[in-house]
Amino acid sequence: MGHTISIGIPTLALKDRAVHIKACIESIVSQRDVVVRPVVIINGTQSDPDLRTALIADTRLRILVSNENGVGAARRLFRESVDTPYFGFIDDDDLFLDGAMLQRLTPFLEDSTLDAVLTDGWRQQTDGTRQLTPDFLIHPDDIVLAAVSAPILSANNHLFRTDAVGSDYIEPDREFYEWFILGARLAMTRRIKRIPTPTFVYRDWSSGQVTKTLRYCEARPKAIEDVLRLPLPTNARDYCIGKIADAYNHLARVYLQNGDWLDAWKSHGNCLRTPGGLRYASFTRRLLLPP
C-alpha cells in the first residue's frame, strides 16, 4: 500500500451541503504525486436521498454509514476502518490546496520517527476574502504548552501516522473541544512537526456562531478539566488551572445574559472556588442587581 493516505470526511449529507461536499471531494482526488483515498462517513439519519445515492455511486469514494448522530462517532468509525499508513480528516465544506498531501507526507518520508504533521491554512469568509489562520504554535519550543494555550489541531490541518494515533485517541461522544484535547494528548505522547505552509481552506460560513452557543460555553470548563487529568508538566498545568476560572466566569456571564440567574450563580460559585477565581469576585455585584 506504500504511502497511501486515507482522508475521512464526516458528513450529514444534507442537500444544502451537496455543492460543498463535491468540491471537498474534488480537492482530495485531484492531489498529485501521492495516492489519497477519500472516505465519506455519512452519519445520522437526515441525509438527502439523492446526495446519498450520488456519493455511494461515486467509485472514487469509500463510503461508511453510521446511524449515530455526532461527528465524533463518525470520526471514530472512520479511524477504526483505516488500513493505510497515514490518515487525516477534513470537514465536508472545506478544501485542500493543490499539493497539500505531498507537503504533509514529505516530512514523514524524511523522518520516520514523526507521528503527526501540522500545517497552516487559509480562513475564508462568506464574502470570499481569505486570511491566514492564526499561528497556532505560539510556544514553538514547548509543544505541550503550545497545545494547552491554543489548539494546535483543527479538523483540516493534520496528517497522522496510523500506527501512532490509534482509534482510542478519537473520542466518539465529545461534541466540542475535541481537537483541543486531542492536540494536548498528542503533544504529551507523540512527535509532532509543524510546517508553516498553508495547505487547506477553512470556509468559515458561521462567522464564529458555534463559539457563541451555550453548549459550547458549557463545554469549555470541562474540556480544560479533562486536559488537567493528563500528566502535564508544571508550566502547562499552571496555565490550564488559570484558565478554568476564566471559563467559569465567561459561562456565568452567558447565563446571566440569557436570564438564567440560577445557573449564573452556580457557575460564579465554581469560578470563585477555582484557584485564581477570586479575581472575579466583583462579578457578584452583577448577580445581586435586579434584572
Image (cartoon, helix red, strand yellow):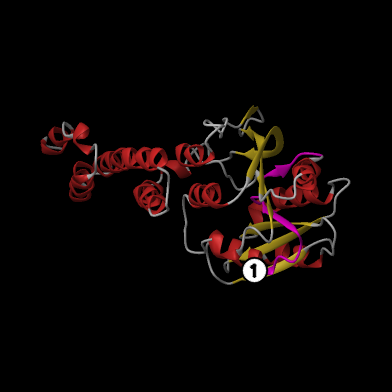
Provide residue 66's location: percent of width, then percent of height. 61, 70
Question: Would you place residue 95 above or below residue 3 in this image?
Answer: above
Provide residue 229's location: percent of width, then percent of height. 38, 54
The magenta stretch is 80-98
Whether residue 221 appears in this view of the structure is yes
Q: Name the residue: 69% across, 59% down.
A: 162
Q: Name the residue: 76% across, 52% down.
A: 25
Count of residue discs: 1
Which image quarter is the C terminus in? top left
**Snapshot quadrant of residue 132:** top right
Q: Is residue 170 left or right of residue 38?
A: left
Between 269 and 255, the one lying in front of the other is 269
Q: Is residue 38 left or right of residue 217?
A: right
Provide residue 115's location: percent of width, then percent of height. 66, 51
Which image quarter is the N terminus in? bottom right
Q: Which residue is mark 1?
A: 80
Q: Is residue 121 left or right of residue 1?
A: left
Q: Is residue 120 left or right of residue 264?
A: right
- Queried whether the magenta region covers residue 83, the answer comes back as yes
Provide residue 43's location: percent of width, then percent of height. 60, 65
Question: Would you place residue 230 above or below residue 107 in this image?
Answer: below
- Queried whether the magenta region covers residue 200, the answer comes back as no
Secondary structure beneath dot 1 equals: helix
For disc 1, the neighbor class at 10 Å (few under 14, some 14 to 19, many from 20) is few
Between 87 and 47, the one lying in front of the other is 87
Between 69 and 84, the one lying in front of the other is 84
